[in-house]
Image: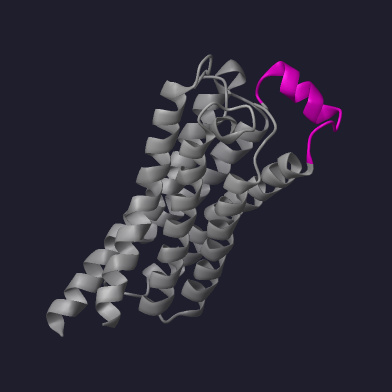
């Protein structure tokens, strides 16, 4: 029973990033006058988005997948670092869901919206979205670094140790570049590269979780 649950948690962790990515791909295609190159993903769930439900669904699925990974790692890896990593993933997962429901008023990368943000003329949920998003990013950068320690102590997970360290460090560098808008008019692409690095790690860890669950089932 426990190992079967582990497999399903791993599958949900894989589905989360895939669903989120499909959501911004499809949402961007059906949104008029939307620039993937310039605008961020959250704009597809903003109050003025034409098909916001698509991106909101993506946020909620990703949040569920992230929490599923946290539960799976906590039940599979009995190390303090794994428990800390799971807490970070739970924070990130809940934060992702909150960010999806606390919608931006407008597309923050566009000049008219940026002026409103700088002047403080945006709603409370716009501010909550931006604040929670930063917390999510930091939690998802820290989680692979913390979990890497637990992975290195377990034969079934050791293969992900180096990858997790690289993900955390590279993710931090990309976050800094995104925050300072190093991409300029290409900041939308910059954000997608940044979040994809973190979300691919969730999917990879989820795949490993499902593999470990199947092996344990077979052994039992």
**Colouring scheme applied when the structure was drawn:** one colour
Q: How many marks?
A: 0
Q: Is residue 21 left or right of residue 142?
A: left
Q: Which residues are magenta?
A: 109-123
Quadrant the N terminus occupies: bottom left
Q: Residue 142, can we see it?
A: no
Whole-percent x and y of residue 12? Answer: 35, 59
- Decide which of 29, 88 is in the foreground and name it: 29
What residue is drawn where x is 52% and y is 42%? 56
Looking at the image, the residue that sits furthest to the bottom is 220
Looking at the image, the residue that sits furthest to the right is 119
Looking at the image, the residue that sits furthest to the top is 33
Figure check: 106 above or below 220: above
Whole-percent x and y of residue 200? Answer: 38, 47
Looking at the image, the residue that sits furthest to the left is 218
Q: Is residue 188 magenta?
A: no
Residue 119 is drawn in which quadrant? top right
- Decide which of 162, 106 is in the foreground and name it: 106
What residue is drawn where x is 85% and y is 33%? 120
Whole-percent x and y of residue 160? Answer: 34, 59
What residue is drawn where x is 46% and y is 34%? 193
Q: Is residue 119 magenta?
A: yes
Residue 187 is drawn in which quadrant? top right
């Amino acid at each position: 029973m426990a190992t079967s649950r582990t497999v399903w948690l791993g599958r949900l962790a894989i589905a989360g990033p895939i669903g989120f990515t499909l959501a911004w791909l499809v949402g961007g295609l059906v949104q008029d006058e939307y620039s993937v190159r310039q605008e961020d993903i959250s704009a597809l769930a903003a109050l003025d988005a034409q098909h916001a439900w698509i991106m909101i669904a993506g946020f909620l699925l990703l949040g569920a997948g992230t929490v599923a990974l946290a539960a799976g790692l906590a039940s599979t890896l009995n190390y303090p670092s794994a428990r800390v990593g799971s807490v970070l993933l739970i924070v990130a997962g809940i934060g992702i869901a909150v960010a999806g429901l606390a919608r931006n008023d407008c597309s923050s990368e566009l000049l008219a919206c940026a002026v409103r943000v700088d002047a403080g003329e945006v709603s409370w949920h716009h501010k909550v979205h931006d604040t929670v998003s930063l917390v999510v990013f930091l939690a998802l950068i820290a989680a692979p670094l913390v979990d890497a320690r637990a992975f290195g102590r377990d034969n079934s997970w050791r293969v992900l140790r180096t990858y997790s360290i690289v993900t955390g460090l590279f993710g931090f560098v990309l976050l800094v570049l995104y925050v300072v808008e190093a991409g300029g008019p290409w900041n939308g692409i910059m954000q997608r590269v940044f979040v994809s690095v973190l979300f691919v790690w969730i999917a990879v860890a989820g795949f490993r979780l499902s593999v470990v669950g199947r092996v344990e089932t077979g052994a039992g």
